[in-house]
Image (spheres, helix red, strand yellow):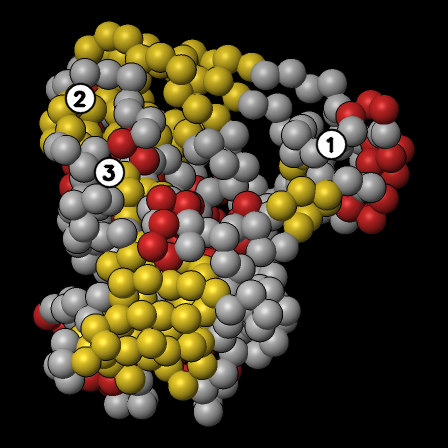
Amino acid sequence: MGKAILVVGGGISGITAALEASEVGNEVFLVEKRPYLGGRVAQLNQYFPKLCPPNCGLEINLRRIKNSPYIKYYTQAEIEAIRGQEGNFTVQVRLAPRYVNNNCTACNKCVEVCPAERPNDFNFGLDKTKAIYFPHLFAFPARYVIDSRACQGTACGKCVAVCPVGAIDLNMQPETVTLEVGSIIWATGWDPYDLTKLTQYGSGRYPNVITNMMMERLAAENGPTGGQILRPSDGKAVKRIAFVQCAGSRDENHLSYCSGVCCLASLKQATYVREKHPDAEIYMFYIDIRALGRYEDFFTRVKGMGINLVKGKVGTITEDPSSKDVILEVEDQEAGRLLKETFDLAVLATGMVPTTSSTPPPVETTFNKEGFIVDAVPGVYGAGCVNRPMEVAACAQDATAAAMKAIQSVVGR
């Protein structure tokens, strides 16, 4: 089918694009900076509106990648340089050392003897792992990895001594590989808006003010609390919770745009609380509820679960230093009054920030003021949330479209 196709980003958009391109016979290189494929979707507890776990859908696609003769994937890999033009790109990829080779059987003996710990970035720092760790329960590839920032290296070496298959190499070095490709799909996804920039909400100083992505991990059975929704400050069960919409979004001082999916994500998370704590008081403070098209029924269903919907943007969040409860001040616009309410936990619906705003592709690219891709050189195509904020289903559709464009770039070349 012509030259290979490079897909940068191993989340749902990148995975979809890689599979679609490979299944018509194209060789595909899939590059992901994390030590596993799956991206943000792997961190979710459930999809909306069906409220099913994402691992079932991810597992099928990851198995297809594993069995595909056309896809070669690289994890802990980042693009250093891109040269050339459509049909004839030369790409340099830097591979960070994993310190664990393909012999790994994930037996966990290395973790049992490791003395060092690190914040678990998969769980947004809500718990810790050892310096050698398995990224998450359903990680692909199913291999351990060492965080060199936490590991004591050859001064310790306990993991090397205990490994029965010789899978650990503490002297592993970075590598650079050069790929020749005909087209490129840039699918590096999104990051949650930086909580520390929200000074009116405590700038990340209050342990019981968390982001919506942190809430996904609290609710997940493979998360830091085994699926129990507990306060980070003291581990107590949540009895009164506030969902704060547009936390930094639709705000000229932060993100000027609406991410489109945050309302639905909060509605979904309200069902987590209702399931785990049937008697909990659940409040959702919003500007507008964005639940368009087929999601209207989902909104109606969740609303019927006894969710207190208050139209009004939360002005400030403070903390009671003795109890660590959080205090929200907000105008109830429909009732025409100011509220000052105390909650066990506040969940901020932070917006989706394209990774291209901080790490743009190393090719000539036009962005809008928010950092989303508008246009790139011929042969380079954005996919998923680098183009605009979107939910999982829309990402898969957008990635399929990008794959079709990439295939057209290489056919006959």
Q: CA distance from mark 2 to mark 3?
A: 12 Å
Kind of residue indicated by mark 3: Val
Residue 377, above or below 214: above
User: Residue 187: x percent and y percent?
Assistant: 30, 36
Pick whichever, 315 or 276, lies toward us: 315
Kind of residue indicated by mark 2: Thr
SS under mark 1 = loop
Residue 303, above or below 229: below
Q: CA distance from mark 1 to mark 3?
A: 33 Å
Q: Which mark is residue 365?
A: 2
User: Residue 219: x percent and y percent?
Assistant: 50, 69
Kind of residue indicated by mark 1: Cys
User: Residue 15: x percent and y percent?
Assistant: 36, 43
**Crowd class of label 2 (few under 14; some 14 to 19; many from 20; radius 10 Å):** some
Q: Residue, x 41% and y 71% (percent of image)?
A: 327
Pointer 1 residue: 151
Q: Are marks 1 and 2 in contact (CB under 8 Å)?
A: no
Q: Quadrant of the C terminus?
A: top left
The disc, 1 or 2, on the residue closer to the chain's N-terminal end is 1
**Crowd class of label 3 (few under 14; some 14 to 19; many from 20; radius 10 Å):** many
SS under mark 2 = strand
Pointer 3 residue: 386
Pick whichever, 338 or 23, lies toward us: 338
Residue 402, above or below 245: above
